[in-house]
Image (cartoon, rainbow, N blue to C red):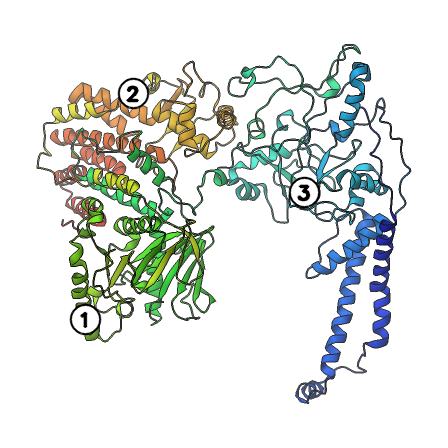
Amino acid sequence: MNPTYAPTRRRVRTAQDITRGLGAAAALVAFVVGLPLVLAVVAPLSWPQSGPTWESIRTALTRPDDGSLLLHVIVIIAWLAWAAFSASVIVEIVASLRHVRAPSIPLLGWFQRGAALLVTTTGLVLSTAAPSLATVVTPVAEAPVSAADVAPSTMTGSSEPMTAMPAAVTRSPAAMTASEGAGAAHEEADRHPVITAARGDTLWSLAERHLGSGHRYSEIRDLNLGLPQSDGGVLTDAHWIYPGWQLQLPADATNLPALAATSEARRDLGATPRVHEVVAGDTLWDIAAARLGDGARYPEILDLNTGVAQHGGGSLTDPDLIRPGWRLALPVPADVVSPAPLESPPTVPAQTTLADSPETATSQAPAPPPSAQQHDGASKPEFGVQAPAPSAADVDGGVEDDAAEEAEPATRLFLGLTGLAALGVIGELARRRHLQHRTRRTGERIPLPPPGSPTEAAERTLRTATTPLSIPQLKTSLLNLASRAYAAERDLPRIGTLVLSDETLELHLVNDDGDPVPPFEAMGPRVWSMPTAALAADEPIEDDPDRPEPYPALVTVGHTDSATVFVNLEAAGTLVIAGDPTAAPDVLRALVTELATSDLAGRIGFVAGPQFAGLAAACDPARLQCVDPGDLASQHASRSAAIVGVLGAIGVDDTLEARSDRAGGDTWLPVAYVDGAEDAEWTPPAAWSGSVLLTTAERSGWTLTVASDGTASLDDDGIHFVPSRLTDADLGRIVDLLAAAAPRPEADGTANAVISDEMAEALAAIPASRDVHAESSSDASGQTLQVNVLGPIEILGLPEGARPLGKRSIELLVYLAIRGKATGPELDEVLWRGRRVDNQTRNSLLYRTRQRVGIENLPPVDADSSYRLGHGVACDWASFQHLVRRGYAEGPEGRDKLQAALEFVRDRPLCGLAGADYAWAESDIQDMSSAIVDAAHVLAASLHADGDHRGALSAATRGLLAEPCSERLYDDAIRAARGRGDGDEAERLTSRLRATLESLDPEYVG
């Protein structure tokens, strides 16, 4: 039996309440009835006797105004205002009588809010109250099911989730002893259901909907008066409530629909359901794409809502038929932190242990509903017990919302650098490692940071950076701007700063120009803007090969709350970094490091003093060189005089104008100088003079001021931001990364080593198997799951009917397939980018993934607290290693094994990753690439020696998929093509090699 309790005692109506209600009613009558009567007397509308003619219109517009025009305008405005307000009052009254939400009338929001306030106050305060009920709380047998018996529910018509209420734990009256009866009764009386107010709700309408009569509004009011709300407001005697407010209802409230009454698997006592209101044109695919990040996840929404009664009747049965106004529950992300309920239900002793958690148990019998509970006499309490359950995403099969959860904010620093600066360092590392692969010998591995070292941690941190646009996309947009400006016979805009957010790229000019080059639009006399999405989709203009780098000295200086800030050093000429004496050198260090590594800087020349000797040693001398500090000023003076002469000879004022006219090519790329000496006799470079000075000394020019609170500002442009700051220790780690990735000297001509020796070297370099079953699984038949990483990631062989895997679930499987096993803390570090997560979050991911792939493919944690894939799971990388080991061991007879291994190669290992994805996998990718190149070279050389030139060419080109910069494989492929007599193919391969190496190494001469 479910006890029903009498409503809370109503607050006695005061004279102030009655006065307020009468005042609201009087105001309504005055505005709706009184105002038109007054207007009819003092400002009547006069209607013309005949229609207007062209002559009358011309006369009215050309004759002198005698003051009557203003009076007529005021009269019309007054009548329109009355009509708008009266219409709003009528709409509110009709909606109240029909018990529906008032529709929103365009342009009348202010009038509607005022009308709703007056109508609601009048209806609430002047209504006749229901008779008072007894104040003694007495359980009534066989009462209707109340709100307290309903598992988590949501308010129909509200876009905000309501507080989840646990299923009621009820007792029969006989189960209460005399000592606990009074306390228990008081406890039950105080436990009230909670709903969330939606737009258009009033206390009256809520009372009608949930208590059966609007007259019981005062019970809701009395329960909630003075309770703080999430927006900081409280319910007052004005009775005004706002969308999103959490309101308690009396214990006998009804009409609180459960979120998913048709499936026990949809119940989640710890998470608040998310809801989407269907609008015209919506489909389940569109909703899943917009709210879950993947349209293919629409079956999760279908499963959650099938059969659930919707407002206005009907329910979801056909995935192709949804109606506007329906409210569809969405899967709850695994990492949602559930709000605590208003009051926890009584603790129930139960024989549950940690083994009942989703991580250590594969299934959990659902608790029977309250109606199915067995009564075992009056002496035993009656409990509706539900065993601990995983989160809603685990139970209902929802995939975690990776799009929102995984992406690091673009407006944060990575090792003290902005996201674009961090990606610049990573791009330079990738370029250097490709060049290392160019001359790598068989069996060698390129040097990488030791696992667990500070250098390796620094690289992983840099790899987590995300940006709205990549460096190539940003460069393409600026190059296209240069081409379009030249085609329109316009000078390049004089950009001083750029602000890049997720939504837009803003160009802030140093002079007025309200006529932007399309597709940019003017946001002001000195601001051009273009959506980031449009920039990302802007294809490079291919028919302008002679265009110069328009802004080669762009550098990021920090970020605001929502955007990254760039400075065009050419526009500044001299940039002085001032302010906090500790922070200023860190900012200078960050700027120099970015300019020396990022491809965005256009490979400008850099000259610095000995404080950057370590960075200079790891960089190309043409990019950064160190000289004696006393020579910096004189070098600049010589260069400045030369540039002035060139600019004068071609008749332009500065380098930007020369760049716009495409004249004087030697002046396009500036040289940047770094000098912090106070006593140096500098003539500070002017804007677009061909030189740039970065300094912490007092000079004329632009000033970047770093405050003691860690913020910064650039002169008086009004932009305040968090500046990039690179400590000396972190610069040392970046230098170590760059030095280890430095390209090695050219090969020494030993490419034609004895094949058997190369096989031995390649075999010795194959990493030891990390998992005992990895090798045996490669030849097994009928594997239930296949993890492919030698190309774009693929997860094949999912059980029939399994829902799609989320990004983090896929990364979990890939990590275990490559690394063999992992502890819980290792998974936290890898999958959550080092963020602290609780065990339940990790267990929820594992449980959810196990539901999809099967327990045989992802067993529970083993005795040594490690996670492994099942023995039936195959991985193409494990199979590749197993085959090449056998092929190398068998010598020339093992060619078929090497050929079979290369069949697994589809592209570069783990290719297609975006941004910060799989930051942990760099060393694995390099190992895989090296092993593939070795196998391809050994096989190609062996086949070529036996005269099988076609097979040799196929093996070499397959290896080039994994590492397109291997000069050894190109030699194999070119030699095989010539052996076949295919000179065209040999020439094509030679040209491809030359183009690849020229794009990576400006000094390359083919």
Location of mark 1 (residue): 646
> Which is in the foreground here, disc 2 or disc 3?
3
In this rendering, position of residue 568 left or right of residue 104: left
The residue shown at (81%, 24%) is: 3
Location of mark 3 (residue): 229
Where is residue 594 shown, x and y percent of the image? 30, 50
Where is residue 975 shown, x and y percent of the image? 13, 39
Q: Quadrant of residue 548?
A: bottom left
The residue shown at (18%, 55%) is: 629
The amino acid type, in three-letter code, at marker 2 is: Ser
Rounded to the nearest angstrom, the CA distance separating label 2 from label 3 is: 58 Å
The residue shown at (23%, 66%) is: 683
In this rendering, position of residue 71 left or right of residue 392: right
Q: Which labelled disc corresponds to residue 615?
A: none
Task: Name the N-terminal-most of marks 2 and 3.
Answer: 3
The amino acid type, in three-letter code, at marker 1 is: Val
